[in-house]
Image (cartoon, rainbow, N blue to C red):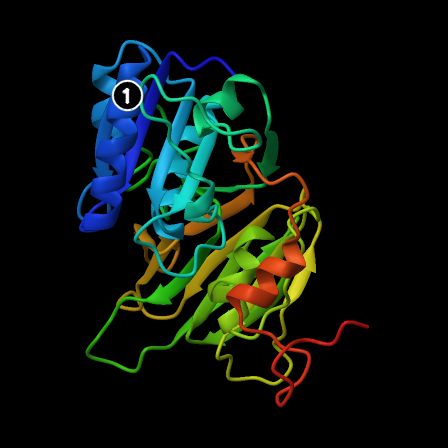
Amino acid sequence: MRLERVWLISRLGSQAAQRQAKRCAEDLAAQGVHVVAASSGLARNPFPGLLATEAHLPDLALVLGGDGTVLGAARHLAPLDVPILSFNVGGHLGFLTHDRSLLRLTAPGQKAEAGQESLWDRLRNDCFALERRMMLQAHINRGDGVARGVGVAGSDGLDQADGAHLALNDFYFRPCLDEVSPTCVLELEIDGEVVDQYRGDGLIIATPTGSTGYAMAAGGPILHPGIEAIVVNPICPMSLSSRAVVVPPRAQLSVWPLGETSRRVKLWKDGAHATVLEPGDRAVVERSPHPALQVLLEQSPSYYRTLTHKLHWAGSLTAPEPSHN
């Protein structure tokens, strides 16, 4: 990998991420790499500013934080084919991130020991793999019949109310009224065929990556990221017949809010607000043509080992270690 330009994105509000970002920036700058550092969080989105002010895209986006920081970077950088390398610094679960121990820096003039080459040397020597993670995109057809947000939005950060929205984990629909019972009625159409009307707390449409997130918490299945499919999962449905389903990646899903005009529904992308839908509006969700490019440093990564560790699975409730069978 060529390392001439690096965007260094750290989690907003995490002192550990800020300190590590400073050390990485100094290490890269000492090697002649052009580094642009920025913080990212729910209250700060650095990507529109970076895309507007930087003349060239980076060779790599180095993300220091948790899964939320990675999701924000993926939504903006996937359409631009910028690879993302992430480390769990100041984050929580860290499903999408590398362990911090793999972030090895080398002081200027210091040689790394055998088998302990610095992170930058590993990248320059192509000692990594690129994993393509399926993403979803959504555009909104308002009740006036005018389609908005078809395709991928430009460099405005995909945050326009009626622009195209991207998600690496999931889209979900939830009622946006606080003064009444938090339920809604959503009609789902798959490839032009009405499948169900969900009455309950909402609806989740997730990727395999997002199947271990909100969809899993709502009782949905866990999909290996090597499987390209879409999970449709109701949230607390008021019917025992409303179940999670898994559909092919080429499926096109349309969701309509039903009911009175006051029954508005919020559309969320990866836990961030996307837009508001009123009865008569339609959200069309489908596979994005732009996968997220994730840099993998581990030679033999195990998805199941990650699940076991992050979800605290165990072979026995009494044994101190899992069985070796």
| Mark 1: few/some/many CA within 10 Å (<14, 14-19, 20+) | some
- Image height check: is 304 above or below 155? below
Q: Nearer the viewer, residue 276 or 320?
A: 320
**Quadrant holding the C terminus:** bottom right
**In this rendering, would 38 be left or right of 312?**
left
Kind of residue at badge 1: Leu
Name of the residue lying farthest toward the right: 325
Residue 164 in the image: x percent, y percent?
40, 36
Q: Residue at x 39, y 55 (%)?
A: 280
Label 1's element? helix
Kindly identify which residue carries mark 1: 51
Q: Is residue 287 left or right of residue 178?
A: right
* Camera-nearest residue between 305 and 195: 305
Residue 180 image point, x, y percent:
25, 81
**Residue 151 in sight:** no
The residue depicted at 43 percent of the width and 22 percent of the height is 111
Residue 133 location in percent, x, y? 58, 40
150 or 113, which is in the foreground?
A: 113
The image position of residue 199, as x and y in percent, is 48, 76
Q: Is residue 237 above or below residue 80?
A: below
Count of marks, rendered view = 1
Instruction: Tell me which corner region of the image, top left, top right, bottom left or bottom right, holds residue 69.
Output: top left
Residue under the point 22% across and 33% down: 22
- The reply to whether residue 91 is visible in this rendering is yes
Image point (26%, 35%), residue name: 21
